[in-house]
Amino acid sequence: MAEQKVETNDFANIDAHLDYQAVVIGAGVAGIYQIKRLADLGIRATVLDANADLGGTWYNNRYPGARFDSESYTYSYSFSKEVLDEWHWTEKFSPQPETLQYLNFVTDKFALRKYMQFDCRVESMVFNDQSNAWTIGLNDGRQITTRFIITGVGVLSTPTLPQFEGMASFKGTSFHASNWPHEPLDLTGKRVAVIGSGATAIQLIPEVAKVAERLTVFQRRANWAAPLNNGPISEADMAQIRERYDEIFATCARTPGGFEHEPDRRGFYDVTPEERRELWDRLYDGPGFGIWLQNFTEIFFDEKANAEFSDYIAERIRQRVNDPAVAELLIPKDHGFGIQRVPMETGYFETYNRDNVELIDGAASPVTRITPTGIETSEGSFEVDVIVYATGFDAFTGSFDQIDIQGTKGELLREKWAAGPVTYLGTTVHGFPNFLMLVGPQTAASNFPRGAELSVDWVTPFLEHMWARGYQRFDVDKVAEDEWFEHVKGMYEGLLLRNAKSWFTGYNSNIKGHEHGNMRYNIYNGGGPKYARTLNEVADRDYKGFYFK
Ligand code: NAP
């Protein structure tokens, strides 16, 4: 049958009987860019978001100290020269309010708000095999029909709480860090407890310590962390950054993590211990993830190299913490540096030198229950006014699991993913036609906007390909999906991170089935450039692995 070509400006007439041609779920970094691309094509599309406004992660996470660990200018959208020219980042690592302002600026600049619907939580998505369309059920009772669903639901957007006895009985204020109250919360004179010591806790602890009367940190396991080395960006700096934007994005595109940080290509063992130390001293004092990503690559797969580097970082921590016993508690003994996502810190270790801060070692004295007035551990009790649960997220699959996503033959996505995500290219899933994911599980872990733009820049031409040919449905080949899954799994082999208690491996002690040892292959470890090449090759080969109708 001859292919029917449709001109771009005819796209809007397709599927007139459906409410939308495409529905984007999530008005965060990925969703904003996706709706921009669809709007430019004249597609009838909308964005649905459960929040009261746009911004996703940057709308939710308002805890004090929340900011990028990515250099601000590498976190920019790269798609618009005008935005790059007009926006001024004021800090090397932008704080949350400025980032939220940036996302609003981009949305308003391109008049995208009119495509967005807020306060609507998606409860179900059901694919109809006859009509090749999805019906989306919302919490307000509405049913929306669409040909395509594109999810931009984020990677770390479903907070998880511990299951301590008595949590509901607490009479003070308590919340997950990700739900930090929107109205100002004055902690002056308050006794505050923070449970957790991940990237979130490590950002908020120094800030809370500055105002609280007393801060007690309940640490179950220590986490490696290194200085962020933030600083202001002046007008002159920003002018230079603007001139360098092409170069910045080109570098991000060729580095595994999508940053300007490039690994040190010298072999770990080809240089002397003094030369290694010289590099590490420089990186420790340098900005952001350099300490992690500009390092020798051996630290990711060679136990001995990792141990030597971890010892170096431990030494730096000892130099910063006055009480040697506290320093030892803050130095992880169960894993090496960099095999979990490294939190970046600003004065974190010095915070434990303050008189109003106490560190509770969860290994020796675990939290046993929450009482109406505080926290009990196996060793004692602590009266507090505020409890902050900085206890992490149901990474990657959590936001999908909350929705009844029903593909062909009645299969639910959460059932298919019960033992961990299975995808084709991190973008699509066999048995779930016309369903696309932006930065889905099993995409390359990278500087988020870099990965988000890559996703959108792949999904959009994919849809154009379909619209131009009058296709109504795509299906994912099971064999192609199996091969991708095996490839993703294989990429974990040999990496030290495969044994980590980390969201990279799907570990979350607060969710049944996500305990340590129940390996979930959440990320593609081949790095951004290789991932991008694979996506492009699939596209170039007429979307190998997909069937179109
Ligand atoms: P996380 O890294 O998963 O840390 C959760 C913390 O809570 C861990 O210390 C964990 O202890 C503890 N915890 C969890 N359940 C507990 C329980 N039942 N009892 C006692 N302790 C418990 O979560 P996160 O700090 O929110 O960070 C998650 C990710 O979000 C980061 O890795 C990062 O990718 C992203 N993030 C990014 C930024 C940024 O870019 N600036 C900032 C914040 C977060 P165990 O270690 O023992 O499990």
Image (cartoon, grey):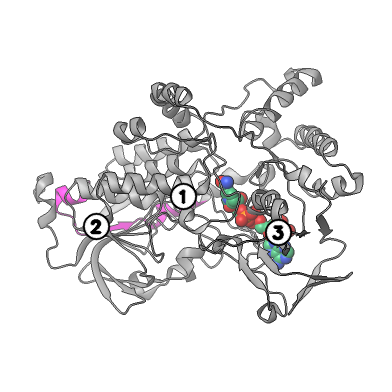
Q: Nearer the viewer, residue 516 or 261?
A: 261
Name the amino acid type tagged 2.
Answer: Lys
What mark, if any, has residue 114 been given in the picture?
2
Between residue 395 and residue 247, name the one nearer to us.
Answer: 247
Q: Main secondary structure of the magenta part?
A: helix
The amino acid type found where label 1 is placed reads: Glu
User: Left of 2 or right of it: where is 360?
Assistant: right
Distance from mark 3 CB to nearest ligand 1 atom below 8 Å: yes
Disc 2 to disc 3, how far (Cα)? 39 Å
Contact, mark 2 vs mark 1 (Cβ under 8 Å): no
Q: Is residue 505 left or right of residue 383?
A: left
Q: Is residue 15 visible?
A: yes
List the residue tagged with mark 3. 196
Q: Which residue was labeled with disc 1?
A: 483
Identify which residue is drawn at 61% across, 46% down: 492
Label 3: few (<14), some (14–19) or many (≥20) C-alpha neighbours in 10 Å: many
The residue located at (20%, 70%) in the rendering is: 131
Label 2 and label 1: CA atoms lie apart by 41 Å
Residue 468 place in picture, x, y as percent: 15, 47
